[in-house]
Image (cartoon, rainbow, N blue to C red):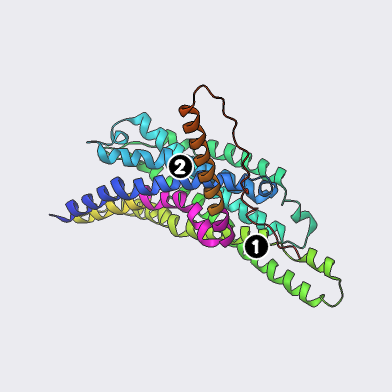
Amino acid sequence: MTLTDDLTLAQLILSRYVLIICSILGIIGCFLNFIIFCKKKLRKISCSVYFQATSVFNLLVILIGITPVIAGSYLAKDPASYLSAYCKARAYTTHAFLMMSRFSVALGCVDRFALCSRHAYIRRLNHRGIAIILVIITIILWLLIPIHVMVYTNVQSSGKCGTSGSYQIFYSFYAIIVTSIPLSIMIIFSFWAIRNIRQSRARVAATDEHVNGNENSRRKMKKEDIQLMIIVISEAIVYLLSTIWYPIYTAYTTITANVSKTSDRVAIENFIRYLVLSFLIFLNSCSIFYVHLLASKTLRQECKQLLLYLFKHNQINVELQTNSSARPGHRQRAPALYIHPPTNIFSSNKH
């Protein structure tokens, strides 16, 4: 087998087996993530709005972005390689929802920074109503900004869905900018938030002898805020590792567009293109919930309790249906059942 055959086989395995596992786990994770952050007590926190929005956007990325890649691996020819309308729509929608997801995480970092700021006017950003408005603005902006992608992306002579000519140069710079902006926001505001937390703790320690216990406890950051901070920073790290290769590859292809290449080099570049555009870039959308699990012990406990609650509830429904089927003439009253609901995921300790 040649190098081209080996890389083609590797790409096929990744698409047919690895991506389908990632997409299934990603869909489950998006639903669980959304349910957990919709809980009555937790949804009052402004940062939960960004987590809910990210879960929805990532679910759409999986359905619109990953599913066609998996389906295309089973077809003799990917529809995006010969259907112009499909190529344009897929490129536009995938890009739009990816950017919505990225900016939701970036806004979550800003929210955590605002929470621990010393300035009251900055802390006002840490409000659920403002979070909802910012998410709506994000949706509108990223439905409008990438319209040029739908206009200029098309099926190329090489049989690939992509860009060419002067627009390819423009798109390479555009990709670097729009990828760098949310990443920069994540890094800068996460750093500032951590710095503010340390300064806040130092101030609390310095004034510990001059304030009573109640005042001191109010000045300390709540446990749920620390947990959300850890989760947001973890999302930023995963985003960096999975997305940084996209603008690098885009810049490389633009620079080497007119360079003569061997068949092996073309095969390697095509495989890297697949990894960057159809594999790594989607791992972020599939892994967010599991990153949350690794980053937060309380989230793991909450998820376990939620699954046990759903399992017990389903078991009782099955038993009731079985009993009703066995005695159709008898109207059975459902037994009173009390199941302890999952506790608040980030409940603060009470002393």
Q: Which residue position is annotated with label 2?
A: 61
Location of the C terminus by quadrant is: bottom right
Front residue (pair 205, 192) = 205
Mark 1 neighbour density, 10 Å: few (under 14) some (14–19) many (20 or more): some
Q: For the residue carrying disc 2, how many other residues have a C-alpha within 10 Å: few (<14), some (14-19), or many (20+)?
A: many
Indicate yes or no whether the magenta region holds residue 81: no
Sequence-wise first label, 1 or 2: 2
Q: What is the secondary structure assignment of the residue under circle 1?
A: helix
Q: Say if 203 sits above or below 180 in the image.
A: below
Disc 2 on helix, strand or loop? helix
**In percent of the image, x 77 and y 73: which residue is there?**
203
Which residues lie in the magenta part? 277-302
- Which residue is label 1 attached to? 226
Q: Measuring 33% from the left and 41% from the top, which residue is drawn there?
A: 69
Asked if 152 appears above or below 207 in the picture, the reply is above
Residue 278 highlighted magenta (yes or no): yes
Q: Amino acid at mark 1?
A: Ile
Q: Is residue 68 left or right of residue 260?
A: right
View extreme (top): residue: 329
Indicate which label's residue lies in the foreground, 1 or 2: 1
Quadrant hosting residue 67: top left
* Near-viewer residue (201 or 140): 201
Picture coordinates of residue 61, whole percent (x, y): 45, 42
Residue 350: percent from the left, percent from the top?
Answer: 74, 62
The one nearer the camera, 310 or 275, is 310
Q: Nearer the viewer, residue 1 or 74?
A: 74
